[in-house]
Image: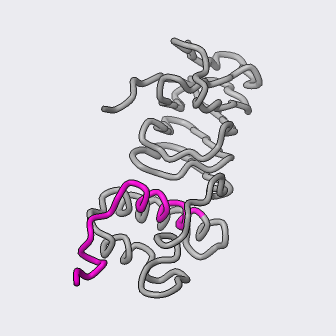
Amino acid sequence: MTDHRDVRASDQDRERVAEALRVAVSEGRITLDELNERIDLTYRARTLGELDEVVADLPRDGSLPAVLTAAPVQGLPGPAELQLHTGSGKVAQVGRWAVPRHISAKAGRWGTVRIDFTLADCPHREVHLDVEITSWFGDIVVAVPRGWQVRDEQVVRRWMGAVHNRPPAPLAPDGVTVRLTGYVQTGDVWVRYRRPVT
């Protein structure tokens, strides 16, 4: 009889493990950094054994992770908040990652914050992104898939601050709204709409 660990994992198996990881973050069992690392391992896993290893230190029932033996649970919350702050230099959130409902992005002198949602796992229909740029040379770059929409009406622009946002299409039925708040004293927020990765 074939050991379950050698059985090829399905997309549904990977999604169930990803949901379990989001629950683990909401319960305080793992950190946001650990979540991002494990999400990446989850989507690269080829077998159930590799998925087992991702959740080996989390509560489980029997030889399989509970999430692999139960039906998928819809609408589980992601992590509560993500903070991307830099006084100078660059910080970025890119690749596969779990999108929280609230994100704070701050760029000071010579600072650049980059947030790329194009490969992200977003369980929310709306995400709140609070921006703050207090330096002439500060930048925040937000990349979203086409079909999403970034709303910037609530951003206060002071002096030479600007938000560059030109949605190429209306919000898709399965799209996500990223709602910007905060203020841009000087510097720029750049919104980029990317085509889906195939």
- The answer to which of 55 and 15 lies nearer the viewer is 15
Residue 197 in view: yes
Q: Quadrant of residue 32?
A: bottom right
Q: Residue at x 61, y 59 (%)?
A: 73
Residue 57 location in percent, x, y?
A: 47, 83
Vertical placement of residue 164 versus 14, above or below? above
Give, as a single range, the part of the protein colored magenta. Answer: 1-22
Q: Main secondary structure of the magenta part?
A: helix
Q: Residue at x 73, y 32 (%)?
A: 181
Residue 187 in view: no
- The answer to which of 83 and 63 lies nearer the viewer is 63
Residue 82 location in percent, x, y?
A: 61, 52
Vertical placement of residue 147 versus 83, above or below? above
- The answer to which of 167 and 14 lies nearer the viewer is 14
Q: Residue at x 55, y 72 (%)?
A: 30
Examine the structure image and report whether residue 9 is included in the region drawn in magenta. Answer: yes
Residue 96 location in percent, x, y?
A: 41, 49
Residue with the most extreme front position: 1
Quarter of the image that includes the N terminus:
bottom left
Examine the structure image and report whether residue 119 is included in the region drawn in magenta. Answer: no
Residue with the most extreme bottom position: 62
Lateral position of residue 27 relative to residue 147, left or right: right
Q: Quadrant of residue 126?
A: top right
Instruction: Tell me the colour scheme of the image.
Output: one colour
Q: Residue at x 58, y 38 (%)?
A: 108
